[in-house]
Amino acid sequence: MFSLVPQVGLICFAWQYVMPLIHTFGVCFKDKPTPKQQTQWAVYWIIVVVYEVLESLLLWVLVEYFPLFTEIKCLAFYWLSASEFQGARFLFESVITQHYGPIDADKVWPQLQKLTNKAAVKKDAAFDSAQDSASKEATKDK
């Protein structure tokens, strides 16, 4: 494996997992994270998982025979995760939303609205029955 940077595996690990994990926890434990921050880190971790699966199944051949593979991988994950670039959010907004936005608007969101409405109705019914039970228990005790 040809590499120009010493300890490139350690640097890549830090850029791929450690730095994004710190930023993700920062967003998760914030009082009011913005939707853009939530999108950035959710999409980033989806990309990481997909990449890891692809690397273990297909790209493992390239790791040994493609010069500077690890350096290019490091730069790609730095671009995806760095707050200056927010590459994961850029990919989501420019590629994924463009192609799947109409499908989401037509098919996914109406179904989610139906499910949330049904869940809200069931929650209200369960809450009302719990209140009725509690009031009956209170009148029995008197």
Image: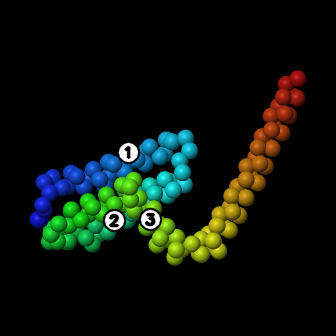
Residue annotated with mark 2: 51
Residue type at numbered disc 3: Phe
Report how many numbered discs are placed on residues in the image. Answer: 3
State whether residue 105 is above or below residue 134. Answer: below
Tell me the quarter of the image containing the N terminus. bottom left
Residue 17 screen position, x and y as percent? 32, 52
- SS at mark 3 in the image: helix
> 125 and 2: which one is in front?
2
> 61 and 101: which one is in front?
101
Residue 141 screen position, x and y as percent? 85, 25
Dot placed on the residue nearer the N-terminal end, 3 or 1:
1
Alpha carbons under labels 2 and 1: distance apart: 20 Å
Q: Report which quarter residue 90 is drawn in.
A: bottom left
Residue 77 screen position, x and y as percent? 32, 60
Instruction: Specify few, some or many for label 2: CA neighbours under 10 Å numbering under 14, 14-19, or 20 or more.
Output: few
Q: Are marks 3 and 2 in contact (CB under 8 Å)?
A: no
Residue annotated with mark 3: 90
Instruction: Specify few, some or many for label 1: CA neighbours under 10 Å numbering under 14, 14-19, or 20 or more.
Output: few
Residue at image location 15% in from the left, 69% down from the top = 67
Dot placed on the residue nearer the N-terminal end, 3 or 2:
2
11 relative to 113 in the view: left or right: left
Residue 38 shows which numbered tag?
A: none
Instruction: Specify few, some or many for label 3: CA neighbours under 10 Å numbering under 14, 14-19, or 20 or more.
Output: some
Residue 22 shows which numbered tag?
A: 1
Residue type at numbered disc 2: Tyr
Dot placed on the residue nearer the N-terminal end, 2 or 1:
1
> 141 and 121: which one is in front?
121
